[in-house]
Image (cartoon, coloured by chain):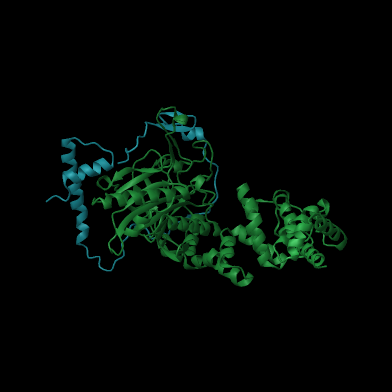
Chain colours: A green, B cyan
């Protein structure tokens, strides 16, 4: 999905995102029912989730701690006092007839997140973060309902959510995606959410509007709901930009509306317009007194916060002498960053270790769609393998062949190298013999080298490597060939 | 002048999914108007410098440790449902746009 250049030349695209994140708690926000995924309908509910008469909500302390952590990690002001409000609307998967949320006094406000965009680093404002409970699930799928009504499953009802609202600071679909990836990375670092989009733990609504470059006032926005993958976010925003640009180009005005993205067609359709916009009749929840957090508790949470990706990246550049690009890739995932650090310390040559992780290990992880912490590959093993290569005891080619096995089964690289007879051949005899054979078999190539065609040496080296089954040390082969050719 | 119009009452009724006939609508408008008049007496108090209060009880929100308890038996959860299939509640078909 490439942005349409004429549209961007004429209009400035203004995007703000609302992200809903499931918190990784064991129990729900206001009820002791378990938070689980994939259970049969209504197997994870409690009278509070069902809004049975007489029940009262009791707030989950860990959810509060997670909200504070998220606020700190996004440079927000964390408010010692916040208020829960009722957001009133009717839907079958909302048994109480209202959602407990925060409205006028959210727990966190006014933060920012730095993203890597086309033009370099950009700071994206975060308006607010508030806590709320998720609704249940309505199942309309005919395969389940056989066309008989709508099924309601309240397992998700009451699962703790953070709603993270950005400022309208994003300027392209690519920036929106970069923001979401950065935000997800931070939330995973601070271990408040697995933020798995497929499980619905990380959901996004996008507000999109256009205005002529240089114009101060914002254009009329449309909100797009139901964006549950990074690809859909980019696709839906791009489609919406094109739609709005066409209206404006024709001299029309954009109608404010809430739209629903339909993955099957890649289009959006109107859910509701401004005229019938929702009126949620928010008011402070009489069942819940204001949430007051002790400043000492806030300080305790701040001190326990792990090193965040931004700071880790800068440290990796300084401490291990890594290029910015490598440092960014290695710190994108906390487990990967830890793995790198352990391996780099065990090996002593961080740059080599970084290269092996980014080039070889990552490729296999991608193919297996897994992360490094769920494999058998120990950081010490990778450190040992890289050392064997750097010391010339095994060729890079042979080492590369061992990576998939180390990832799947683990093991000691040195032992594997011995078992498989993969030791690099660098001793005189075998290489000298192979080189002599190759030169004898390719007199033409040898002649061209002597006539000044240096590049032909690579061909000859390749032939020697072939004869040794890729186990020859390239440096040794080069030396031997060069000497023999000069003789 | 009444503090609330019939149009406002009609809108609130629609938000609350209530259907009022003419007679009910008139009566409700009068009644809500009377309630608003009653509550409006509070506006006579000078509240300069006083923090808004949603609760009269000077309590902090009690917190609960994040420990999951066993869920209730699903059979019990749906026991009173007028219609069910397996352990799912079944409600009349929710159509697109019905939210509006």
A372 sits to left or right of A119: right
Instruction: Examine the rendering and report whether any part of residue A281 can be seen.
Output: no
Above or below for B77 versus A353: above
Q: Quadrant of residue A320?
A: bottom right
Q: Which residue lies at the image location 35% right of the left edge and 49% below the top edge? A: A240
Camera-nearest residue between A63 and A265: A265
Indicate the position of residue A51 as horizontal and vertical percent values.
41, 42
A134 sits to left or right of A468: left
Which quadrant of the rendered structure holds the C terminus of chain A? bottom right
In the displayed image of the protein, which residue is found farthest to the bottom?
Answer: A318
Camera-nearest residue between B5 and B65: B5
Q: Which residue lies at the image location 52% right of the left edge and 64% below the top edge? A: A301
Indicate the position of residue A288 as horizontal and vertical percent values.
40, 53
Indicate the position of residue A21 as horizontal and vertical percent values.
47, 52
Above or below for A142 versus A234: above
Q: Which residue lies at the image location 44% right of the left edge and 58% below the top edge? A: A175
Indicate the position of residue B57 as horizontal and vertical percent values.
37, 58
Camera-nearest residue between A446 and A292: A446
Instruction: Examine the rendering and report whether any part of residue A41 can be seen.
Output: yes
Above or below for A96 versus A310: above
In the displayed image of the protein, which residue is found farthest to the left?
Answer: B1
A298 sits to left or right of A255: right
């Amino acid at each position: 999905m490439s942005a349409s250049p004429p549209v961007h030349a004429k209009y400035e695209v203004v995007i703000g995102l609302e992200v809903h994140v499931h918190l990784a708690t064991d129990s729900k926000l206001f009820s002791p029912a378990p938070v689980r995924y994939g259970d049969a309908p209504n197997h994870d509910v409690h009278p509070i989730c069902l809004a049975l008469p007489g029940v009262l909500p009791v707030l989950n302390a860990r959810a509060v701690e997670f909200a504070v952590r998220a606020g700190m990690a996004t440079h927000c002001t964390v408010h010692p006092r916040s208020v829960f409000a009722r957001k009133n609307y009717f839907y079958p998967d909302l048994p109480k007839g209202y959602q407990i949320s925060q409205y006028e006094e959210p727990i966190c406000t006014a933060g920012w997140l730095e993203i890597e965009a086309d033009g370099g680093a950009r700071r994206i404002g975060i308006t607010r973060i508030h806590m709320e409970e998720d609704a249940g699930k309505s199942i309309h799928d005919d395969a389940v309902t056989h066309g008989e009504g709508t099924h309601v499953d309240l397992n998700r009802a009451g699962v703790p959510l953070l709603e993270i609202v950005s400022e309208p600071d994003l300027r392209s679909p690519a920036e929106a995606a970069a923001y979401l990836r950065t935000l997800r990375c931070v939330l995973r670092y601070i271990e408040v959410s697995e933020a798995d989009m497929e499980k619905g733990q990380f959901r996004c609504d996008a507000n999109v509007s256009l205005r002529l470059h240089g114009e101060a006032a914002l254009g009329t926005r449309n909100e797009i709901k139901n964006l549950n993958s990074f690809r859909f976010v980019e696709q839906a925003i791009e489609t919406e930009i094109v739609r709005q640009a066409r209206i404006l180009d024709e001299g029309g005005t954009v109608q404010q509306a809430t739209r629903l993205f339909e993955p099957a067609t890649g289009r959006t359709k109107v859910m509701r317009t401004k005229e019938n916009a929702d009126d949620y009749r928010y008011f402070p929840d009489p069942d819940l007194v204001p949430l007051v957090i002790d400043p000492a508790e806030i300080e305790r949470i701040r001190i326990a916060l792990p090193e965040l990706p931004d700071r880790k990246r800068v440290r990796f550049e300084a401490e291990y002498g890594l290029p910015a690009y490598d440092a960014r890739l290695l710190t994108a995932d906390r487990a990967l960053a830890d793995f790198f650090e352990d391996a780099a310390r065990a090996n002593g040559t961080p740059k080599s270790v970084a290269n092996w992780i980014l080039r070889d290990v990552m490729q296999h992880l991608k193919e297996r769609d897994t992360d490094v912490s769920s494999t058998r590959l120990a950081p010490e093993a990778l450190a040992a393998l890289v050392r064997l290569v750097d010391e010339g005891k095994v060729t890079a080619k042979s080492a590369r062949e061992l990576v998939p096995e180390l990832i799947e089964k683990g093991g000691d690289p040195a032992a594997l190298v011995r078992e498989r007879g993969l030791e690099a051949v660098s001793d005189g005899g075998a290489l000298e013999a192979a080189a002599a054979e190759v030169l004898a078999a390719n007199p033409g190539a040898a002649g061209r080298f002597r006539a000044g065609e240096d590049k032909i040496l690579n061909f000859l080296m390749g032939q020697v490597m072939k004869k040794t089954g890729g186990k020859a040390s390239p440096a040794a082969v080069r030396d031997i060939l060069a000497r023999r050719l000069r003789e | 002048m009444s503090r609330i119009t019939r149009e406002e009452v009609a809108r609130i009724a629609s938000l609350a999914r209530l259907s009022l006939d003419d007679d009910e609508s008139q009566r409700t408008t009068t009644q809500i108007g009377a309630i608003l008049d009653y509550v409006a007496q509070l506006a006579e108090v000078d509240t300069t410098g006083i923090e808004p209060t949603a609760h009269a009880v000077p309590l902090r929100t009690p917190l609960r440790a994040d420990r999951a308890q066993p869920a209730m038996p699903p059979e019990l959860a749906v026991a009173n449902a007028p219609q069910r299939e397996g352990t799912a509640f079944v409600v009349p078909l929710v159509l697109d746009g019905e939210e509006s």
